[in-house]
Structures are given as C-alpha cells and as structure tokens.
Image: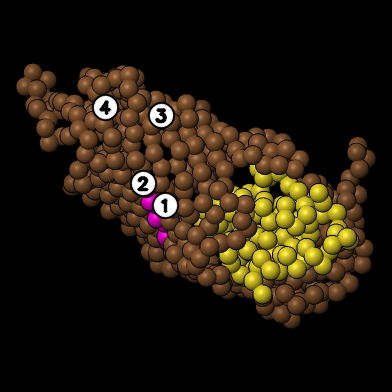
Chain colours: A brown, B yellow
C-alpha cells in the first residue's frame, strides 16, 4: 500500500497541475471562436452549402454577410490537373439559425459534381477562421453514399465501444514463476442481406475471447457464433420511450473454457428493446451530457452440453435469459479543475435453467496442502445464474481517470461465481504531440 | 406537426417531381425523427442522445424508403460516436427508387 502511494501520489500531483494548466490555457480560445461541426453541399440543389454550428455559437452579425465567406474548391476530372476555383456567396439564409444552429450559403454558381475538396474561410470583425477542409464524398454530394471507409471493409475506430474488431492483450514471463497474461478480444462483422427493393435483415459472425491469469479455477471463455439480426417492425417512429425493438438469432454458436473441458453448443433467439429515459422529443442537449438510456433483452439459450467434467452431456436444455444495460454520463462543458467527465455503465443478466448446469463456488474451495493452492470443485445445480457489472469512471482530466468497478455473479460456460468484487483503477490515455517518440525509438 | 407528419407532407409535396436525390432538408427531418430530437442536436452523437444505433439505422433506412428513395442500410452510420449531422450528409445522397 505504501508503495502504491509512493508511486501514484507524485503522479497524481503532476496530473493535477497539468490539468489546471490545461484548463487555464484553454479558456481564451474557447470563449472566442465558434465551432463549425459540418459543411454540407445540398445534393438536391448544388448552389446551396449548409453550415452547421456547435457551441459556442457565432454572433449573427459575424456570419450573415456574404462577404464574410470565402470559399474555394478543388475539382478534378480523370487524370487532368486539379482546378482551383473560387465560389462567390450570393446570400446567406439565416432562417434556420435559431432552430437548427445552421445557416445556408446560396452560391452564384453550382458546386461542380467533380469537386474533390471544399475550403472555407470565415472572416469576422475580430478573427479569421479557416474551417476544416471538406473532402468526404457524402458531404460534397458527389457519389451515391459511400460509407466512411470507402471501399475498405474496415477502418479505424475511436475506442473499444466503437469498434467491431478489438484486441487487448499482455503477456509477462516471470523467472521461476507462472507467466502472467491477460487477453480481452472480440471480432464481429455483419453484412446486410439486401436486394434493390427488399431488405431481409443482416447476417454476421462474432467471436470473443476473455482470458486472464487466475490462481484458482479457469475463469476464461471463448465464444463464437453466427448471428441473424432484423428489426421487428418497419416503423419509423418511437413508441414513447422505446425505439424499434430488434431480433437477434445466434446460431451455430459455441462457448468453451480455455482448456476445452467445458464445451456448449448454443442456439439463442433474443429480442432487444432500446429505451431512453425520456420519451419526449429532446430539446437542446448541452455538449457533454449523455442522456440516460438502457436496453432490455429477453430470450432463450438452447444449450447442448458437448463436453463437461460433471454436467450430463448429449442432451439439450434451455436457459431463459433476461438482461438490462444502463448508460449515462456528464462531461464538463467548460474546462474545470480536476473534472472532465463522469460516466456510469451498468449491466445485469440472469439465466434461468431448465436442467442442472455446472458451477464453481469459491466458498466450497479446498486448500491443497501439497501445492498451497485452493481447489474449487465443480458442482451441479439449477439455481438462477445472475451477473452484475457496474463501472463508474471519473475523468479528472481528458486523458486520465479513476475507475471503480463492481462485479458479482457468474457467466457461462463454467459459471465461476464471483462474490462482490470491487476494483479501483487508474487509467491514462496520452498521445504525444511532438516527434519525441521517434527519438526514443532510435538506436 | 410531428416529425413523421412532416416526412409524409414533404414526400407528398414532391409527388411527381421528386428530385433525383433525397436532399438535405428531408434528410434532417428523417434523422431527427429517428433520434427523436430537435435539429439543435445535429452535432451530438448517438450516445449523447441516448439512441441505440441498430434501431436508429433501421428507422432511417425505413424512412428513406418510405420517402421514395433507396440506400444501402450498411451505408447508414450507426456507431455510438456517430453524429447526427454525419448521417444527414450520407443519406441526403440517397437516390430515387
């Protein structure tokens, strides 16, 4: 404990002072310049460019004059040299500014269909703002919509929650002891089954691996399955607090522990109901706020135990499955000392069994005097299998957070019961802004 | 007038003279209807607004089809970090059926 304090206290103080410096340095800029979140060429009228603002909003006088806008485009046909052209703004339509935080620039000429880049500068009485160049074909309205990654099936993602393929692993060899490893990985890909006039749902595959070193029973799991997904209704509206529910059918699935001692085949139809804790049409949401929302899932898992150290094999049985997730958060709209954001995520699931399944409960563990390790014997039972995971992240800077996680219960395939477990962690996400890293890597 | 009535009215107003692409205005109405939010939140993400991406994507796809246009459902962004305005940019290019 003393070592922990020795290590992290100075680090915490450095982090705190950096956070203060960053906050005070960020103030003047944040108060000045408005934020432009998008510029979009209207696909149905190419003389119009829609400019969408975010907070802080600009003053009306600063953006309402056509002369305030200087627009250049770069266009190219085939292998010809690119052409640079200035587009004059004829008028600025401010009618949607108060209702949509957006304005429309009406040009004297059309934006050509071979445009490759849009470059806009906003001149106000106090500043010259060079807006981010627009190069994506969707915003330039130059193609039948392509996804962000173009023709590539995969592109980079922002974080774990935003990814379809994720791997996080570590392995540490120790002299005279067992190696320490920790792997958390998943990969999934869904493809729409869609013709010119009909949509039949989506088909995909998913795999997940969670494994880490454990002094007792193997808590690890492998999960692979095919999945079919489709919305239950073709409605295009909400029903109170509910969005359209959707159906997921996992089939040809397999769940197994790391050693392969427990292997289950799974067939699982489930229905998911997304719920937002506000049924009304949302008004303006402050930047940084996450509106509380949850999902409710109901379904079954048809299980064929193929291999087990104790459970009967070769017969199918059923698990009733109910689960819920909850997410909310808040991010400081302005830089604050020792507070950037706070996020709460929680999930609960329960499986109700129609036949006995294996489980491991540490309270029945027996100490093996020869090895000095506790051995937990496998047991059979039909008791409901609960699992709760709650995580609270307090980010005292953009790149550093305290995390508090509480887990309880057990998960298939081996259902190792975890009593109330509280974990406190410190996480950092830093990115170097200079080229110092290359200096470090040089021999 | 709610979002869905507005979509219906815009579709009927264009009957017989629909432009070849969906266009910005109709795209904004569809996206805001499917996120159940005001256009003041076009810069917010699906996660900020408490919107489930799978349902949202299906809703946008259904609405585009009902408006007389077509788009690949996989081309409609649905990640938690997707902003509403980025969805508008994509679906405004949906072509007439």
User: Residue, x 68% and y 35% (percent of image)?
Assistant: A152
Asked whether disc 1 touches disc 2, contact meaning CB atoms under 8 Å apart, the reply is yes
For the residue labelled by badge 3, is the local secondary structure a helix, a strand or a loop? strand
Gap between marks 3 and 2, in whole Å? 16 Å
Which comes before the other along the chain, label 1 or label 2? 1
User: Residue, x 33% and y 30% (percent of image)?
Assistant: A317
Q: Which residues are magenta?
A: A324-329
Which comes before the other along the chain, label 4 or label 2? 4
| Pointer 2 residue | A322
**Residues packed near mark 4 inside 10 Å, few (<14), some (14 to 19) or many (20 plus):** some
Q: Residue furthest left?
A: A369
Which comes before the other along the chain, label 4 or label 1? 4
Chain letter belonging to callout 2: A
Q: Is residue A327 magenta?
A: yes
| Pointer 4 residue | A218
Asked whether disc 3 touches disc 2, contact meaning CB atoms under 8 Å apart, the reply is no
User: Residue, x 59% and y 54% (percent of image)?
Assistant: B56
Expressed as whole percent of the image width and height from the top left, the position of residue A5 reads 23, 50
For the residue labelled by badge 2, is the local secondary structure a helix, a strand or a loop? strand
| Pointer 3 residue | A266
């Amino acid at each position: 404990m003393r070592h922990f304090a020795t290590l992290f206290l100075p680090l915490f103080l450095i982090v705190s002072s950096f956070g203060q410096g960053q906050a005070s340095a960020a103030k003047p800029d944040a108060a000045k310049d408005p934020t432009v979140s998008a510029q979009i060429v209207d696909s149905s009228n190419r003389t119009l460019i829609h400019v969408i603002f975010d907070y802080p909003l600009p003053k009306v006088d600063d953006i309402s004059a056509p002369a305030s806008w200087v627009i250049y485009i770069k266009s190219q046909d085939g292998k010809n040299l690119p052409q640079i052209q200035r587009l004059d703004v004829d008028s600025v339509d401010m009618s949607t500014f108060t209702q949509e935080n957006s304005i429309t620039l009406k040009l004297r000429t059309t934006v050509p269909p071979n445009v490759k880049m849009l470059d806009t500068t906003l001149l106000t009485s106090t500043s010259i703002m060079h807006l981010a160049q627009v190069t994506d074909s969707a915003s330039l309205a130059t193609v039948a919509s392509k996804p962000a990654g173009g023709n590539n099936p995969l592109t980079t993602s922002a974080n774990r929650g935003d990814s379809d393929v994720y791997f996080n692993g570590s392995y540490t060899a120790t002299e005279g002891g067992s190696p320490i490893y920790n792997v958390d990985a998943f990969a999934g890909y869904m493809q729409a089954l869609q013709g010119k006039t009909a949509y039949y749902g989506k088909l995909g595959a998913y795999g997940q691996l969670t494994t880490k070193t454990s002094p007792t029973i193997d808590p690890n799991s492998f999960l692979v399955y095919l999945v079919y997904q489709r919305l239950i209704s073709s409605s295009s509206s909400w029903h109170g607090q509910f969005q359209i529910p959707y159906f997921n059918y996992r089939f040809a699935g397999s769940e197994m522990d790391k050693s392969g001692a427990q292997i289950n085949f799974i067939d699982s139809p489930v229905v998911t109901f997304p719920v937002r804790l506000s049924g009304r049409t949302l008004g303006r949401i402050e930047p940084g706020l996450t509106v509380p929302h949850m999902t409710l899932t109901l379904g079954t898992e048809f299980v064929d135990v193929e291999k087990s150290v104790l459970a009967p094999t070769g017969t199918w049985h059923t698990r009733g499955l109910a689960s819920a997730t909850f997410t909310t958060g808040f991010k400081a709209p302005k830089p604050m000392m020792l507070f950037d954001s706070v996020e709460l995520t929680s999930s609960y699931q329960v499986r109700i069994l129609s036949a006995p399944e294996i489980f491991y409960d540490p309270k029945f563990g027996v100490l093996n005097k020869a090895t000095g390790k506790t051995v937990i014997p496998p047991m059979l039972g039909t008791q409901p299998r609960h699992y709760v995971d709650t995580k609270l992240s307090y980010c005292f800077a953009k790149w550093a957070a305290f995390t508090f996680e509480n887990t309880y219960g057990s998960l298939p395939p081996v259902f190792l019961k975890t009593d109330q477990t509280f974990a406190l962690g410190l996480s950092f996400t830093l990115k170097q802004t200079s080229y110092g890293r290359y200096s470090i890597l040089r021999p | 007038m709610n979002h869905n009535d507005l979509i219906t009215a815009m579709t009927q107003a264009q009957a017989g003279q629909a432009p070849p692409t969906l266009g910005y205005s109709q795209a904004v109405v569809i996206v805001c209807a499917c996120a159940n939010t005001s256009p003041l939140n076009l810069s917010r993400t699906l996660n900020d607004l408490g919107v489930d991406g799978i349902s949202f994507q299906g809703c946008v796809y259904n609405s585009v089809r009902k408006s007389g246009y077509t788009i690949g459902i996989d081309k409609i962004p649905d990640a938690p970090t997707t902003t509403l305005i980025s969805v508008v940019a994509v679906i405004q290019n949906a072509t007439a059926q």
